[in-house]
Image (cartoon, helix red, strand yellow):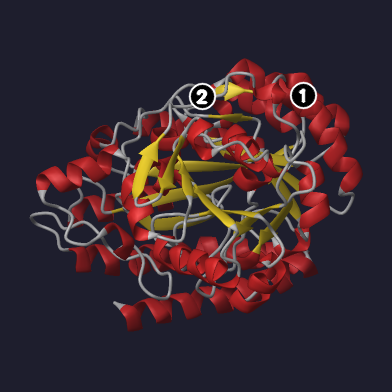
Amino acid sequence: MSSGMKTLFLNPPSFDGFDGGAGSRYQARREIKSFWYPTWLAQPAAMIEGSRLIDAPADDKSVEEVLKEARDYELVILHTSTPSFGNDAKFAARLKEQNPDVVVGMVGAHVGVLPMESMKGAPAVDWVAVGEFDYTCVDVAKGMPLRDVPGIAYRDGERVEFTAPRPAITDMDALPSVIDVYKRDLTIENYYIGYLQHPYVSFYTGRGCRSKCTFCLWPQTLGGHSYRVRSVENVEAEMQRAKELFPQVREFFFDDDTFTDNQPRAEEIARRLGKLGVTWSCNAKANVPRKTLEIMKENGLRLLLVGYESGSQQILNNIKKGIRLDIAREFSKNARELGITIHGTFILGLPGETPETIRETIRYACEIDPETIQVSLAAPYPGTELYRQAQEQGWLEIQSDDLVDTHGIQTAALNYPGISKTLIFNSLDEFYKKFYFRPRKMFTLFGGMLRDPEVMKRRLREGVEFFAFLRERKTTA
């Protein structure tokens, strides 16, 4: 596809340590240096001839550096998020100051859910995308009048107008691969995830998630609850291309919300990957049957990223997780027996949380014993059911842009009767220490370091970053 406007896609500079996360921009700093690929921006960039993608956080580019590089572009499209919106709005203003004729757009879940508020909060922005924005960006880049571009809110003088909704994409195979954009515009060695082998590459084989988790941002905003997928042949071709372009890559990660939602498809893709001889990992729900796990493991699967969230069945029911603790325990046992590594994620402060459920979750995490964990604080993002509940019940005492502090560290946003947000905030440190400072866990981690000098070097760096992060949390509490 061609472009009538010289187009720049941009993850703007942000606070130190703000990673690229969740396929676009993560909502906070992580405990260790982490950068996810800007896949949501790379997709439309692959559709617009002559465009460029700059991922400023991963490339450690300053505001002044990016402004200099953006000077000659006619269209600049920023990806934003709820915590970074204020910062991104200021950057948009700098773009307009530098070049009053530049057209500035914003995309992402935040502006999609709050288009009117976003346009008011970012007066330098000419339009924001409402919903999936791939073809929206293409239409704008062609030079189509904004009033004729479906799926946007745009500025018409002093007024903000809305165009007709844009239907969700159904033919996922029609979207070109992002791999060539990665090769052209990104330095893959700049992307780190603590539990993935370095260097790694991640991308999507589909969008949407069938689960109804009340806290999860993407399915409730951009992705939807229908798992729309690319064909097995399409995925195989992209993997073959990625293997050719990036021979140094040690692991490929499928960032679909739940890659295992369609088990027969996951099994067939695994068989194709086995023939390619690649190491790969993916997101999974804690209910994948042993037979599917066996097929994936036999064909190059190394790791599963699993959202366990809580060790309280009542909390899992409250958030509509759609998982039973006994099933999750059996899944974890099967994965361990098959030699599949698990990175488990947990959330403190979900509806129904009490001091006892926090203790239950910590005990549960130690029992199922993933290789590594990530502990987050419940974050009610606009557009989610959790956000609606928090407003209705009076749990939310902050503004949505206060979900992280000025350093990018998550705040405890929800306050419940019987448990304070301070206790929830402080419990995160306790969770990490009780999980990682067990003799068995320390022995396992040190054993891996001794067996591999590269792992040793990396774990030492991550350890320094981890303890620095915990110290900084105490100073900002």
Q: Outermost residue, top direction? A: 264
Residue 13 % position (x, y):
57, 69
The residue that disc 1 covers is 234
On-image quarter of the C terminus: bottom left
Residue 80 % position (x, y):
48, 55
Q: Is residue 179 above or below residue 120?
A: above
Residue 464 % position (x, y):
57, 79
**Residue positioned 31% across, 53% down in the render:** 378
Residue 289 visible in rendering:
no
Q: What label does residue 168 carry, if any?
A: 2
Question: As drawn, is 204 to the left or to the right of 158?
Answer: right
Question: As drawn, is 407 to the left or to the right of 186?
Answer: left
**Residue positioned 50% across, 55% down in the render:** 26
Residue type (three-letter) at the residue carrying disc 1: Asn
Q: Is residue 419 above or below residue 453?
A: above
| Element marked by disc 2 | loop
Separation of marks 1 and 2 at Cα, in angstroms: 20 Å
**Residue positioned 17% across, 53% down in the render:** 354
On-image quarter of the N terminus: top right
Residue 358 % position (x, y):
26, 54
Figure quadrant of residue 34:
bottom right
